[in-house]
Image: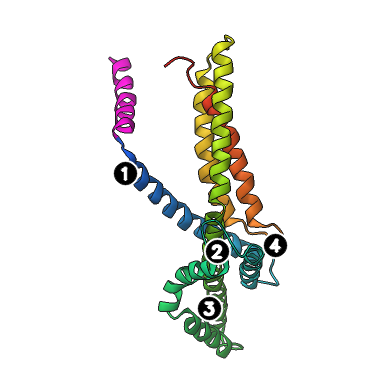
Amino acid sequence: MSAEQNRRPSEQRSQQERARGPIGWLLALALGLILTTIGSWIGATLIEIGGMYTLWPEQRAQHARAGLIEDYGYVRTFPRSLLVRDTQAFARDMAGWAAWPFSKARLADQLARMRTSAQTSAGASRGQAIRQRVLTEAADWLEASYYTAQDTAVRLAIAFYGLPAFAMAICIGLVDGLVRRDLRKWSGGRESSFVYHHAKRFTGWFLAVGFAAYLAWPFGGLNPAYLVLLFAAAAAMSLSTTVSSFKKYL
């Protein structure tokens, strides 16, 4: 009885996966992209806040601003793309969309008001000194989130420029895997469902976790385009292993 109960959830999951059509996959992909982008922005903001007290205490929120300016500089190095005619304008539009909620909330006025209130309470009582510190820290946190939101959008634009290279890497991994599968099929190679299932999981891992890490990368000095190529190559290798270890006979 327990074996049947354990078998039923797996059968239901497999039936749900078979029932999901192309529209369902596209919706799942779009939802995953949105959630990954939002999660990367939150993660990047938390990293910037942590770095204010550990890695870059002198720069504070200006570290996030410097990262945004640096990524804009990388965009200027490749003004054209196969998908976008003007990469700089597209990146600015993406950053503008990310900054739109902050602009509607009048973040600049709020930051100026908070910092002015903090300065006017200087030299006052202990309670007012605590209030000054809280306002100063909150202003830096909000400013860092503002810059990281724009930087995440700019890196999302860079990833969009790299889609042709990513698609080519996926095709190479797919073809290489099919060739290796045929060689294993006609040379009497062994089946390994363990390798297949784990390689299949790692393919999704490289696509999801690698993309999130790319968006939230906090350190400068590295062109984001190189990170796109790195994770594309890793995903292609994982896909090649997945396809090559697929069943020899269907």
How far apart are the alpha carbons under marks 3 and 1? 47 Å
- Who comes first in sequence, dot 4 or dot 3? 4
Determine the secondary structure under disc 4: loop
Mark 2, residues whose alpha carbon is within 10 Å: few (<14), some, or many (≥20)?
many
**Tag 2: residue type?**
Val
- On the rendered image, what quadrant is the C terminus found in? top left
Quote the CA–CA distance across marks 2 and 1.
Answer: 28 Å
> What's the residue type where badge 4 is placed?
Leu
Please tell me whether mark 4 or mark 2 is closer to you in this view: 2
Number of residues whose C-alpha sits closer than 10 Å to that of mark 3, classed few (under 14), some (14–19) or many (20 or more) = many
CB contact under 8 Å: marks 4 and 2: no
Specify the segment rendered in magenta.
1-19
The image shows residue 191 at horizontal and vertical percentages of 53, 14
Q: Which residue is mark 3?
A: 135
Residue type at mark 3?
A: Leu
Which of the two discs, 2 and 1, labels the residue nearer the N terminus? 1
Residue 59, position in %: x, y?
Answer: 68, 72
In-image side of 6 versus 249 (left or right): left
Q: Position of residue 183 (x, y in %)?
A: 59, 17
Cα gap from disc 4 to disc 1, whole angstroms? 45 Å
Residue 112: x, y in percent? Answer: 53, 85
Residue 224, located in which quarter of the rendered image? Answer: bottom right
Residue 190 seen from this side = no
Decide which of tag 4 and tag 2 comes sooner along the chain: 4
Q: Distance between the Cα atoms at labels 4 and 2?
A: 23 Å
Question: Which residue is labeled 2 in the image?
Answer: 154
Mark found first going from the N terminus, 3 or 1 = 1
Tell me the residue that label 1 is attached to. 23
Residue 242 visible? The answer is yes
